[in-house]
Amino acid sequence: NDIPAPLYFVSPSQISALVPYATPPGTARVVALVNGVRSPEVQVRVAATAPGIFSTQQNGFGPGAILKADYTLVTAANRARRGDIVQVFLTGLGAVTPSVADGAAAPSGALTNTTATVNAYIGGVKAKVLFKGLAPGFAGLYQLNVEIPQSAPSGTSVPLGIETPNAFHDQVDIAISP
């Protein structure tokens, strides 16, 4: 929609860009400008929120990109426990307050918070979300601090779901001790 989008990565076959915060929900026009030459226009649907949890396999499935309080990765060999607070990393949570410029790293002093409601479910059990905002020091990376419910099931592949007013994402899992 003629709003410059910050770029994360560019190759001959891929462009990874951040959707500018000012992009309204609906249909957006996307055009790449390479050496002054415009690409054909592509139209994409844009929602106010569309969560996507990062995975360790980098394909959006399987073990989630989730850290324990000691900043170690949650894995089948390093499971989280009920009552632990874990950090979940994702994209697509939309606007934040205070606002941050497109492509700018989130501040580490004054934390940003998403304006949208965010719910987390672990093994189908609603979990307490203690923080929902941009990960300090990163551009476009969101972080949820989530307390694992005492009644959450255990296992190496417990489903993790994130719900916003516009979408639900449950393609990754978390390992929880019995």
Image: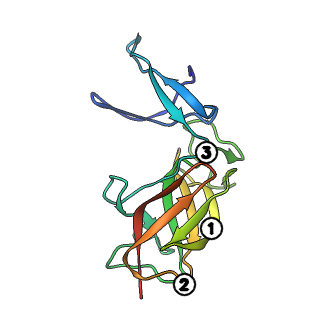
Give the x, y percent position of residue 177.
41, 85
Q: Amino acid at mark 2?
A: Ser
Q: Residues within 10 Å of mark 1 (few under 14, many from 20)?
A: some
**Pointers 1 and 2 in contact (C-beta within 8 Å):** no
Residue tagged 1: 129
Label 2's element? loop
Q: Residues within 10 Å of mark 2 (few under 14, many from 20)?
A: some
- Up-down: is 161 above or below 110? below
Q: Amino acid at mark 1?
A: Val
**Mark pair 1, 3: CA separation:** 17 Å
Q: What's the residue at 63%, 37% (across, down)?
A: 101
Give the x, y percent position of residue 71.
46, 70
Q: Which mark is residue 175?
A: none
Classify the position of the C terminus by image quarter: bottom left
Q: Residue furthest bottom?
A: 178
Q: Amino acid at mark 3?
A: Gly
Q: Which mark is residue 94?
A: 3
**Mark pair 2, 3: CA separation:** 30 Å
Give the x, y percent position of residue 38.
41, 13
Q: Which mark is residue 151?
A: 2
Task: Work out whether residue 176 or residue 113 is closer to the camera in this orientation and state it.
Answer: 176
- Up-down: is 8 above or below 163? above
